[in-house]
Amino acid sequence: MQRHEWAIGARHLLTQLRRRLAAIASSDTESGALSLEWVAIAIVLVAAALALATFLAGKLSALEALIPR
């Protein structure tokens, strides 16, 4: 990545951060700040992904045991 591209990316991240901080500081609750519902949804999705990964790892181990050596 070239230095110019890095600077554009950094500027974009800073702009997004400023927008988020302004949304949090404002009294408007619908201004784009994360709400408790979205945080709860994210936690549920992460927990479901971890449970699925654990389940599939167990199934994969069981299938690997069936392969003759």
Image (cartoon, rainbow, N blue to C red):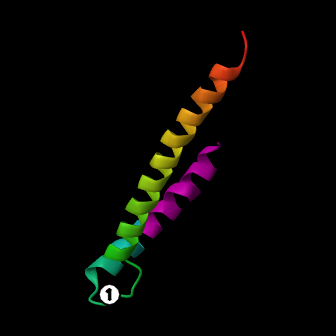
Residue located at (48% from left, 40% from top): 54
The prevailing secondary structure element of the residues shown in magenta is: helix
Residue 18, image x, y percentages = 38, 71
SS label for mark 1? loop
Q: Which residue does the numbered mark 1 point to in the structure image? A: 29
In the picture provided, is 26 more to the left or to the right than 43? left
Residue 63 found in image quarter: top right
Residue located at (40% from left, 72% from top): 38
Q: Is residue 9 magenta?
A: yes
Residue 41, image x, y percentages = 41, 68
Residue 1, image x, y percentages = 64, 42
* Magenta stretch, residue numbers: 1-16
Q: State whether residue 34 is above or below residue 67.
A: below
Residue 39 found in image quarter: bottom left
Residue 32, image x, y percentages = 41, 80
- The one of 6 and 55 positioned closer to us in this rendering: 55
| Type of the residue with mark 1 | Thr
Residue located at (65% from left, 23% from top): 64
In the picture provided, is 24 more to the left or to the right than 58? left
